[in-house]
């Protein structure tokens, strides 16, 4: 499904961040990249999702393949439309929008948006707390609730592969356990492959 073949990543044409990274991810598999801050985990995810381009970074050697198509030269919007959705580190929410409006943003990627209500109900089944908070501004809910919303927003885009960048960051241990239980459930029930970054 996904393969990174000896990739090298450079920022601003001078700063070498990754060298010789290779791995493969099968359909429906869960894989975790572990390492300290600065090890290149987030850069690896951004190389896959195409977000390197927003930070003046690029893959300068090797290639990234998704479903037998080379994607490392593609833009992030095209990669997202192929079904690779990244949940960024640090809970980046659209703070002035409600929980439900944040969830609906993901339907922008879909050619057929008619399944929006059905998709919302699916997200609310995984995260029932979000249904009770659906009209709340997302900037005013807890960190755990924001993380649930971001996972739900990723689900709304019908991902084949979810890239999760430190979803446990700053959360209480009980919430971390709940989030990881939901990630496992999404993987098993939706057959979504997951590449997870943690320290």
Image (cartoon, grey):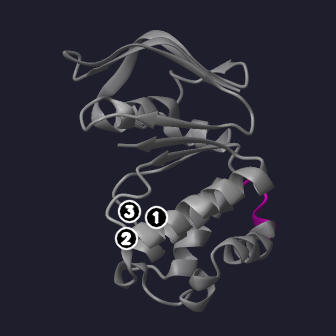
Tell me how far mark 2 sits from mark 3, CA to CA: 15 Å
Q: Nearer the viewer, residue 98 or 133?
A: 133
Secondary-structure class at tag 3: loop
Q: Are marks 1 and 2 in contact (CB under 8 Å)?
A: yes
Q: Main secondary structure of the magenta part?
A: loop
Q: Residue furthest left?
A: 14
Say which element carries label 1.
helix
Any magenta on residue 112?
yes
Of the numbered discs 1 and 3, the one sitting upstream in the chain is: 3
Whole-Å distance between the Cαs marked 1 and 3?
A: 14 Å
Residue plotted at (56% across, 86% down): 134
Q: Which residues are magenta?
A: 110-114
Image coords of residue 122 (percent x, y): 75, 71
Q: Decide: marks 2, 3 in contact (CB < 8 A)?
A: no
Q: Is residue 186 shown left or right of residue 170? A: right
- In the image, which is nearer the foreground, mark 1 or mark 3? 1
Give the quadrant of residue 127: bottom right
Place of residue 162 in the rendered image (x, y in percent of width and height, measured from the top left): 59, 46
Image quarter of the C terminus:
top left
Specify which label sits upstream in the sequence, 2 or 3: 3
Task: Give residue 58's quadrant in the image.
Answer: top left
Q: Is residue 146 visible?
A: no
Which label belongs to residue 91? 3
Q: Which one is nearer the viewer's eye here, 188 or 85?
A: 188
| Badge 1 density bin: few <14, some 14–19, many ≥20, Cα 10 Å | some
Q: Which residue is mark 2?
A: 172
Q: Image quadrant for the N terminus?
A: top right
Name the residue that disc number 1 marks. Answer: 176
Q: Secondary structure at mark 2?
A: loop
């Amino acid at each position: 499904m996904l393969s990174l073949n000896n990739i090298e990543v450079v920022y601003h044409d001078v700063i070498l961040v990754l060298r010789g990274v290779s791995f493969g991810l099968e359909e429906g598999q869960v894989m975790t990249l572990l390492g300290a801050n600065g090890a290149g985990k987030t850069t690896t995810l951004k190389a896959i999702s195409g977000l390197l381009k927003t930070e003046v970074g690029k893959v300068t050697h090797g290639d990234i393949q998704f479903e037998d198509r080379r994607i490392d030269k593609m833009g992030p919007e095209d990669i997202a439309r192929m079904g690779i959705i990244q949940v960024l580190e640090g809970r980046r929410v659209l703070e002035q929008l409600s929980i439900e409006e944040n969830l609906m943003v993901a339907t922008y990627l879909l050619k057929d948006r008619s399944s929006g209500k059905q998709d919302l109900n699916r997200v609310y089944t995984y995260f029932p707390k979000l249904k009770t908070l659906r009209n709340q501004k997302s900037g005013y809910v807890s960190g755990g609730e924001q993380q649930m919303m971001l996972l739900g927003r990723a689900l709304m885009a019908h991902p084949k592969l979810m890239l999760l960048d430190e979803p446990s960051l700053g959360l209480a241990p009980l919430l971390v356990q709940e989030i990881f239980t939901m990630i496992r459930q999404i993987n098993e029930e939706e057959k979504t492959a997951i590449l997870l970054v943690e320290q």
